[in-house]
Amino acid sequence: MQHVISVTVENKPGVLSRISSMFARRGFNIHSMAVGPSAERDGSRMTLVVDGPEMEQIVKQLRKLINTIKVTEFDPGEAIERELCILRVSAPAARRSEVLDVAAAFGAEPVDVGAATVAFELGGTPSQLSDFLEVMRPYGIVESVKSGRIALGRDIKNPQATLRAAG
């Protein structure tokens, strides 16, 4: 089972190494990791997608690490999740318009056009990117790269409606 964990940390040398080592020592596979600046001054936010049965203990250990500010494990559907993919597909002149039309149906933007290939950029949910890769596979994927997943907790749209529904 995959778990999405958000960790806000101080910008200090070795923090990323300590966190990834902690997962490795405990036998957990990190499926993806994305790190970037956070809203906290001098802080970074990491989003980890981890394979494993239960994360309660590792989340507690993350909270105890030096330089950790905040740790959140998102329940399924509790977060807005996105990834970015750049995909180079075989596109000879005879099939180029077909490849462009299929990519456009997914909202993918051509970012590089070569003599026999087209590279596309697409951002979206992990399942949207997976679907795009599967549809493009028959054309011949020359190369691809995906970013790590980023996630942000969903906001409660109408607290009064939530309170009425719960009551």
Image (cartoon, grey):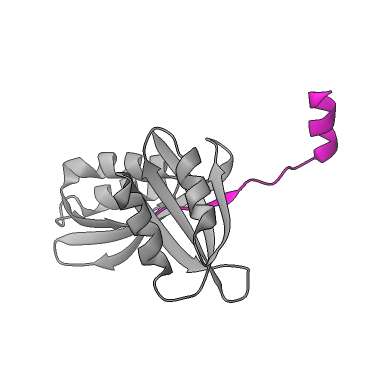
- Magenta-colored stretch includes residue 162: yes
Q: Nearer the viewer, residue 31 or 62?
A: 62
| 103 shown above or below 12 | above
| 2 shown above or below 95 | above
Rendering coords of residue 67 (x, y %):
52, 67
As drawn, is 24 to the left or to the right of 47? left
**Which residue lies at the image location 85% right of the left edge and 27% below the top edge?**
164
Q: Quadrant of the N terminus?
A: top left
> Where, by quadrant of the figure, is residue 41 drawn?
bottom right
Rendering coords of residue 77 (x, y %):
55, 36
- Magenta-colored stretch includes residue 96: no
Rendering coords of residue 153 (x, y %):
61, 48
Q: Quadrant of the C terminus?
A: top right
| 157 shown above or below 48 | above
**Which residue lies at the image location 40% right of the left edge and 39% below the top edge?**
127
The residue segment tinted magenta is 148-167
> Where, by quadrant of the figure, is residue 114 drawn?
bottom left
As drawn, is 49 to the left or to the right of 138? right
Q: Nearer the viewer, residue 161 or 58?
A: 58
**Which residue lies at the image location 23% right of the left edge and 60% below the top edge?**
118
Q: Is residue 147 visible?
A: no
| 142 shown above or below 134 | below
Q: Nearer the viewer, residue 29 or 97?
A: 29
**Number of numbered discs:** 0
As drawn, is 14 to the left or to the right of 73? left
Q: Nearer the viewer, residue 58 or 36?
A: 58
Q: Is residue 23 visible?
A: yes
Rendering coords of residue 6 (x, y %):
52, 53
